[in-house]
Amino acid sequence: MLTNAFTSLLKYFSRYSWLAWFWTILILIACTWPGKDIPSAPVVGFDKFVHSSLFVGWATLWLLVYPRKSTTVLLLGMAYGLGLEFYQQLLPFDRTFDWWDAVADAAGVLIGYGFKTLVLDRYLQRLY
């Protein structure tokens, strides 16, 4: 029962790109939010964990929609993360460019690729 629901959910995500677009916009909103309004990190490095987690989700969702365009999705994800850092530098409030955030975004894209190919694809292969 749970397997059928999970498989149906993955098929839905792969058929419709609205959730991937929604996630992309949510990342943009999160990166635009004024830094003074964001709670301080509970531990050192938590910010990098958040960045990479957001991009794990981003890569996974886009790779479900475009499974045969993995190189394009990977490059676009890394460019999006880097572009957001440049964008934050231009904002008139307390957001700044941070190379380590861009690295965390790129790492998240790569982890998302690994998750999609090594976990989800193998899981779906075992079902069929």
Image (cartoon, rainbow, N blue to C red):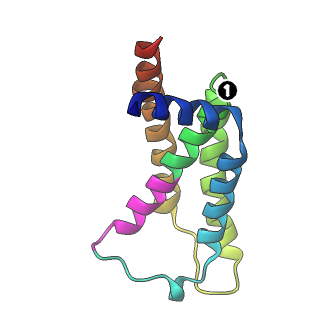
Q: Nearer the viewer, residue 16 or 89?
A: 16
Which residue position holds label 1? 69
Q: Is residue 71 visible?
A: yes
The residue that appears at 60% across and 46% down in the rendered structure is: 78
Decide which of 94, 3 is in the foreground and name it: 3
- Asked whether residue 106 appears in the rendered view, the answer is no
The stretch of residues the image draws in magenta is 43-54
Q: Secondary structure at mark 1?
A: loop
Tell me if residue 38 comes above or below residue 47 in the rendering: below
Q: Tell me the quarter of the picture where residue 125 sits.
A: top left
Q: Residue furthest front?
A: 1
Q: For the residue carrying disc 1, how many other residues have a C-alpha within 10 Å: few (<14), some (14-19), or many (20+)? A: few
Q: Is residue 44 magenta?
A: yes
Q: Nearer the viewer, residue 2 or 11?
A: 2
Give the image location of residue 111, x and y in percent: 43, 40
Quarter placement of the N terminus: top left
Residue visible at 41% across and 22% down in the picture: 123
In the image, residue 126 above or below residue 26: above
Which amino acid type corresponds to the residue marked 1 in the rendered image? Lys
| Front position in the image: 60 or 72 | 60
Residue at 62 percent across and 45 percent down: it is 77
Q: How many marks?
A: 1
